[in-house]
Image: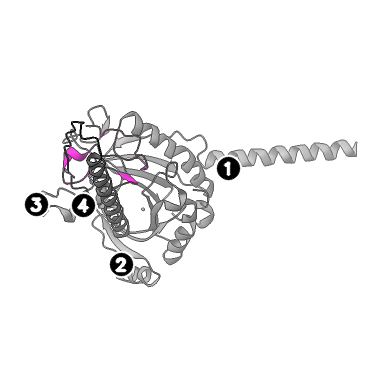
Amino acid sequence: MADWLLIGLFVAMVLLLLLTIFGFAVYSGLFTEVIVNAGLPPIGNITVAYKFQVGPYGDSGRFFTESCSVSPRLSSIAIYYDNPHTVDPEKCRYAVGSVLSEGEDKPSEAVIRMFLKYGFKIINFPAPSHVVTATFPYTTPLSIHLAVNRVHSSLDVYIKDRKLCAHPRLEIYKGNKIYFICPLARQGDFYVPEMKELEKKNRAAAAAVETDDDQTDITGVDTMSETSSVSVEATTDISETSVATSILSPFASGHSRDEADNRSEHSYSESGASGSSFEELDMEGNGDGMAGLLCDLGSAEDRDPAQVKWTKEPLAPEEKRGEE
């Protein structure tokens, strides 16, 4: 009898443990429906303290921990520039930090000095006009892992099906929610200076390779048989590209809408083979001015101020982000 009692107690404890784990997973968002839509952004213009890194996204946890250690009450933010499924993890580029202020609020000078003291840099991001966005509960550390596995795949499907140009990917941990935001225009405004510098170097290297290829082709023509009649037309129409157009960033220049189809296979929105005109999207809020918006990497400082129409991100410790 005693043996059966012990076995019964053991089974009951195992069942109770399993139910507890199951309830914890449900509370963390296991069965939460992921709804992706395109529309107005859930945030306004923000001031961010960040650190830029090149390497596996799984290493970002320590930077979340570092930024939260400076000011635990601020929302955390991450900006991912490359698709980890197509880019070597060691070459992925991202920025992690904290949101110092949003909208009309001004960041505290003391907080700014504190972040600068620990090696962070300060940047202002404008409010994006239209975005692809999704939210996920942020109730436990498990929510991070569930969100990474579920939301990003849903974003991929949505962007691919509608042939959108939506990048980079922003994650903002605010309150009890995680906001996933992919700008649909003026993406260059969300590139930190370090990222822009890398893009310039990539473009210069790509231009040098292209020049070498052109010279090789011309030399090859000279060695052909004299009996051959060959006409060579050298085309040197090299369009000006924006700061984010390179071998790892496939999106169009902010200077010319005709360049909107210059894409690469490495970015988060490589599935968007052509920029949609938004005609088939169910936009939330006011949809005026939606038609014709394509990938646009021009930043605000690159344009005439009179033409700029822009108005005017919980804690994520290392264990939360280690597997991202």
Closer to us: mark 1 or mark 4? 4
Q: Is residue 114 above or below residue 284?
A: below
Q: CA distance from mark 4 to mark 2?
A: 26 Å
- Which stretch is magenta? 247-276
Q: CA distance from mark 3 to mark 4?
A: 14 Å
Q: Residues within 10 Å of mark 4 (few under 14, many from 20)?
A: many
Say whether marks 1 and 4 touch (CB < 8 Å).
no
Label 4 amino acid?
Answer: Ser
Q: Callout 1: helix, strand or loop?
A: helix
Query: What kind of colouring is applied to the model shown?
Result: one colour
Give the image location of residue 13, x and y in percent. Answer: 74, 41
Nearest to N terminus: mark 3 or mark 2: 2
Closer to us: mark 3 or mark 4? 4
Closer to us: mark 3 or mark 2? 3
Residue identified by numbered label 2: 108
Q: Callout 4: helix, strand or loop?
A: loop
Nearest to N terminus: mark 1 or mark 2: 1
Residue identified by numbered label 4: 299
Residue, x 26% and y 58% (percent of image)? 124
Nearest to N terminus: mark 4 or mark 2: 2
Label 2 amino acid?
Answer: Ser
Q: CA distance from mark 3 to mark 2?
A: 30 Å
Label for residue 306? 3
Q: Callout 3: helix, strand or loop?
A: helix
Nearest to N terminus: mark 1 or mark 4: 1
Label for residue 24? 1
Closer to us: mark 1 or mark 3? 3
Question: Does the rendering let one see residue 44?
Answer: no
